[in-house]
């Protein structure tokens, strides 16, 4: 089965389509051109209208690779670049390409994930798809066809043909609304074409379309298929399913179970009390179902019953298991888990544990006569003083800030750093103590165990019209577990705009309300409150659960009624602003507080909310959590769920920084209007709205405007919003009052005037108002000459434009602003001294009782004259080599080093001797730390080890040992066996119990 998607750009537009859509189209077209089988093609009118390259072109443009095939690696790389692959982008998204010495990694057009091609000595040895997050091999392949990234680069426009030429002899079936939609699209093409010639060259003509569909079968508007009962929503799913099968599965009547996983099929069999026959395909399942229940691994959303001469019931996992059914979503891509980053980047600011703040200038290969070559780290300190350090020192180097401007560097000898470091270490001690007490107190505090009635909850979940993404499903599971744990939940759900946080809140609220407890949802703005009231009312309507609303939009009488009903318990769910945290608002049986967009609440508001949430379950939601919230989650003070997996059809918003010219406004707004869409224009201040309104009337007089801001009367805001939502206004001119909550799929262009006046998270939230469907969206950041700080924000937003960037933006905000104090509202603190990554590490160590002071985190100095590094002809990318070095430097066990070695060999092929030496050196360093050896010298004349002084009883000061502080082993060692001799020496020390005299391990 093949799915041909539509372009996500306008017809006759020079803008490039997204690489994902363009790549999927080339893959499908090449498969159709090969005619190797008779596939089922599913498509839309918009996708079939553009003219395409002739089938013969794909032979020249597609690259074919097979195992045991000869390969010219450089020619292969050039061919991939010519096909549209980007050699500077990692293969996390379509079109990414990285070339290493013995492997090539790329994300092919139309593929579901990246592929790694291993080649050595000019021969392809292995091809396998892999998980870009964990680097695990997913599936091996004998051959691979690599399609170009865009059909637009293939052949000339004059040679293009109608796509129906690919489908000669195919049966064509069209939905009942296709003819009418095709007429509308042809009319739009005729109207918007620059000239008739370009219309003819670029798209199928009306006559050719009607001729191709003249023999098509048009589907009827209705079907005789009957739905399957939703057993999961009945009082006893087991009994209902068994009764259905007993009444239906008779001679001549077939029953087929379907599920996305074998685990779900087994659960369906247990509930039904039958043993189903597993079948490989639909035909086999049809045959088997006449004698017994058949089972097929296919992930159907709903089942059906046929009323034909051979009645059949298809029962899906969704009907039997409800929300517990597992659905396969191959088009969603998991992103890396977010946390403290240990890998420093070239050009960034870093913090050295003993020396302080510096700039990481990169890696440098150092060689000298009679000394083995080695790669070293170049750091630049104050007064442009640069030093080279061995790669093992990466254990002491942590990322501080990606943008080094404004960072005050320390002296290379560490004198300027020592006092600040000591002061921050003391603060971390007190913070860890206070955090530990808060965590213990939270675990000691009891809260109601909330368990929703299964039948009612499944009925509620069934009203969700989409499949939950993997991250979304995990967040929902986390929340439901917390609600039933018996102590107050304090969980943050961080998900980018439009990634499904509201559904998590809806299910948490449903579980709580259906269990008989009250729920309050607090939001920062009246507009967002009104939007949530509509969403919640729609979902809860079948359950006769009323939604209360308390905000500036409420009249005095409405407010009094809401407060009375909350106090007597007759109102179970209320949504509003911080008015809900007022002293005169009393709840009869409050079970859950949900705080949406917590980053927009001020200090005073948070103090009021703190009193409201005391002793009850709390769920906080944010697309860009404030730095303090992120740091608190990383420290373990609060639980964290991250929704980083975008919906399957979600596309990145194209983000551009542009001058605020009338031509920019006109081009962007008219482009959106041509594709039947709507636009936002945002101003930073209310006084900017009137001048902008006049500019828009002059630039695009044909477009209708709606205007809203925070000082308007509530009724006026509602009226203007309804005009825009209903499509009666083309442009919504507003302040950032629309920053949260608006979900208008038709609106896919936003222009932000005075963008330099907004914060990073504000800009990201505003950008999130567009691109919430499958249509390509545009965000224009309009500014004249932003200052340094504003320029960094705009550059960061332009850089972080991929779907799911909200958490990265929070991390960048943490990088730019610092986290402040975790236990108060102070904006300066030890997080800014150490940087987020090192601060998180030190605080985690303090909380777990491990050594966390700089003096205790020592690392051995190794002097072994063997080349131990990653050569550039093995791994060309400097950032990737730094990642390998950093992972090794921070490894805490031999098992972890073994895993890194396996990963390196899997990604880059068989390691050369220098890399094998690198891993051996890492194991030696780990053993030295365990034995308390601070320096190890290994040469052809023997081995010398310097032991770490034992800590004295008084305040942990170091004191020299009474006897042997240095061990010497004199013996001739061949140069090729220096590393193995060092490992044997350390193993002998361990056997002889030398480690007893120095227990300090440093990690």
Image (tube, rainbow, N blue to C red):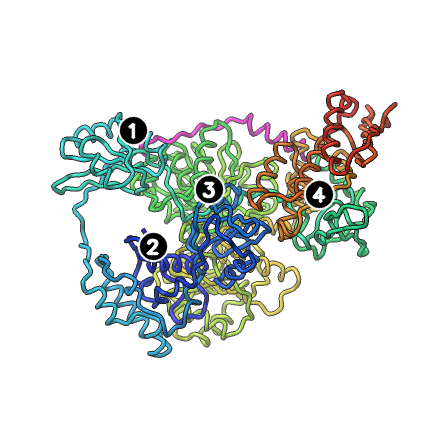
Few, some or many residues within 10 Å of mark 1 (<14, 14–19, 20+)? some
N-term mark: 4 or 1: 1
N-term mark: 3 or 4: 3
Magenta span includes 290: no
Q: Please tell me whether mark 4 or mark 2 is closer to you in this view.
A: 4
- Of 563 and 253, the residue lying toward us: 253
The residue at which mark 4 appears reads as: 868
Magenta-tinted stretch: 431-456
List the single residue furthest toward the right: 962
Q: Which mark is residue 3?
A: 2
N-term mark: 1 or 2: 2
Q: Residue 138 carries which label?
A: 3
Give the side of residue 187 with respect to residue 924, left or right: left
Give percent across and percent down for residue 904. 59, 43
Give percent across and percent down for residue 702. 39, 74
The residue at 81%/56% (across/down) is: 383
Q: Please tell me whether mark 2 or mark 3 is closer to you in this view.
A: 3
């Amino acid at each position: 089965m093949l799915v041909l998607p539509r372009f996500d750009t306008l017809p006759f537009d020079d803008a490039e389509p997204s690489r994902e859509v363009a790549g999927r189209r080339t893959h499908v077209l090449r498969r159709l051109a090969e005619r190797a089988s008779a596939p089922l093609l599913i498509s839309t009118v918009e996708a079939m209208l553009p003219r395409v390259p002739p089938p013969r072109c794909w032979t020249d443009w597609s690259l074919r690779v097979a195992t045991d095939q000869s390969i010219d690696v450089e020619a292969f790389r050039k061919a991939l670049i010519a096909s549209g692959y980007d050699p500077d982008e990692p293969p996390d998204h379509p079109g990414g390409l990285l070339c290493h010495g013995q492997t090539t990694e790329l994300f092919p057009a139309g593929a579901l994930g990246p592929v790694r091609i291993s080649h050595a000595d000019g021969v392809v040895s292995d091809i396998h798809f892999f998980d870009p997050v964990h680097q695990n091999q997913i599936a091996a392949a004998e051959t691979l066809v690599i399609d170009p990234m865009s059909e637009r680069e293939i052949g000339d426009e004059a040679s293009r043909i109608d796509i129906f030429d690919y489908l000669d002899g195919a049966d064509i079936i069209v939905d009942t609304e296709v003819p009418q939609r095709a007429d509308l699209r042809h009319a739009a093409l005729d109207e918007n074409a620059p000239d008739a010639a370009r219309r003819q060259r670029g798209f199928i003509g009306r006559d050719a379309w009607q001729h191709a569909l003249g023999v098509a079968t048009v589907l009827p508007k209705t079907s005789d298929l009957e739905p399957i009962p939703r057993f999961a929503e009945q009082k006893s799913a087991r009994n209902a399913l068994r009764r259905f099968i007993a009444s239906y599965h008779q001679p001549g009547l077939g029953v087929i179970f379907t599920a996305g996983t074998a685990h779900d099929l087994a659960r369906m069999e247990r509930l039904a009390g039958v043993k189903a026959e597993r079948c490989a395909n639909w035909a086999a399942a049809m045959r088997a179902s006449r004698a017994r229940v058949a089972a097929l691994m296919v992930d159907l959303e709903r089942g059906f019953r046929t009323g034909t001469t051979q009645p059949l019931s298809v029962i899906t996992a969704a009907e039997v298991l409800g929300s517990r059914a597992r659905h396969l979503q191959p088009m969603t891509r998991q992103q890396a888990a977010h946390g403290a980053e240990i890998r420093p980047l070239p050009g960034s600011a870093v913090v050295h544990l003993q020396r302080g703040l510096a700039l990481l200038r990169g890696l440098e290969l150092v060689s000298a006569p009679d000394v083995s070559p080695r790669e070293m780290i170049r750091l630049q300190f104050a007064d442009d003083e640069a030093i080279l350090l061995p790669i093992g020192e990466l254990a002491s180097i942590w990322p501080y800030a990606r943008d080094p401007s404004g960072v005050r560097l320390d002296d290379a000898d560490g004198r300027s750093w020592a006092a600040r470091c000591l002061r921050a270490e003391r603060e971390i001690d007190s913070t860890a103590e206070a955090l530990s007490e808060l965590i213990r107190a939270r675990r000691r505090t009891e809260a109601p165990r909330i368990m929703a009635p299964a039948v009612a909850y499944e009925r509620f979940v069934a009203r969700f019209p989409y499949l939950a993404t993997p991250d979304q499903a995990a967040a929902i599971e986390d929340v439901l577990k917390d609600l039933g744990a018996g102590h107050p939940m304090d969980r943050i759900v961080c998900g980018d705009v439009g990634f499904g946080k509201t559904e998590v809140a809806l299910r948490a609220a449903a579980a709580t309300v259906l269990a008989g407890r009250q729920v309050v949802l607090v939001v920062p703005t009246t507009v967002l409150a009104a939007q949530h009231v509509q969403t919640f009312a729609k979902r809860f309507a079948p359950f006769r659960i009323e939604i209360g609303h308390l905000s500036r939009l409420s009249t005095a009488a409405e407010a009094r009624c809401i407060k009375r009903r909350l106090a007597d318990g007759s109102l179970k769910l209320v949504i509003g602003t911080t008015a809900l945290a007022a002293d005169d608002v009393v709840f009869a049986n409050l079970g859950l507080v949900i705080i949406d967009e917590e980053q927009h609440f001020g200090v005073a508001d948070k103090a009021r909310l703190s009193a409201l949430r005391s002793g009850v379950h709390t769920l906080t939601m944010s697309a860009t959590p404030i730095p303090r919230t992120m740091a608190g989650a990383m420290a373990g003070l609060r639980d964290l769920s991250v929704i980083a997996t975008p919906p399957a059809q979600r596309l990145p918003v194209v983000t551009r920084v542009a001058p605020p010219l009338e031509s920019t406004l006109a081009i962007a707004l008219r482009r959106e209007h041509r594709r039947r869409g709507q636009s936002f224009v945002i101003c930073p201040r209310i006084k900017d709205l009137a001048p902008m309104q006049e500019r828009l009337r002059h630039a695009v007089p044909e477009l209708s405007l709606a205007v809203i801001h925070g000082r308007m009367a509530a009724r006026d805001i509602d009226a203007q919003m309804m005009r825009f939502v209903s499509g009666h206004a083309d442009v919504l001119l507003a302040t950032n009052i629309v920053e949260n909550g608006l979900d208008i799929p038709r609106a896919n262009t936003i222009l932000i005037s005075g963008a330099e006046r907004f914060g990073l998270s504000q800009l990201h939230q505003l950008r999130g108002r567009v691109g919430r469907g499958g249509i390509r969206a545009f965000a224009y950041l309009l500014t004249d000459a932003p200052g340094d700080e504003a320029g960094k924000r705009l550059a960061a937003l332009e850089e972080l434009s991929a779907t799911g960037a909200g958490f990265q933006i929070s991390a960048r905000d943490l990088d730019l602003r610092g986290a402040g104090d975790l236990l108060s509202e102070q904006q300066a603190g030890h997080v800014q001294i150490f940087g987020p990554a090192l601060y998180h590490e030190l605080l985690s160590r303090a909380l777990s009782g491990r050594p966390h002071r700089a003096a205790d985190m020592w690392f051995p100095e190794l002097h072994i004259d063997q080349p131990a590094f990653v050569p550039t002809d093995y791994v060309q990318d400097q950032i990737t080599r730094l990642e390998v070095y950093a992972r090794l430097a921070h490894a805490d066990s031999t098992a972890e080093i073994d895993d890194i070695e396996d990963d390196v060999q899997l990604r880059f092929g068989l390691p050369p001797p220098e890399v094998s030496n690198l891993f051996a050196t890492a194991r030696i360093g780990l053993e030295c730390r365990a034995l308390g050896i601070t320096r190890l010298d290994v040469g052809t004349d023997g081995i010398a080890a310097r032991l770490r002084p034992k800590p004295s009883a008084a305040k942990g000061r170091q004191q020299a040992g009474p006897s042997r502080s240095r061990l010497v082993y004199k013996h001739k060692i061949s140069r090729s066996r220096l590393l193995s001799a060092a490992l044997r020496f350390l193993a002998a020390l361990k056997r002889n119990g030398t480690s007893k005299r120095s227990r300090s391990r440093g990690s």
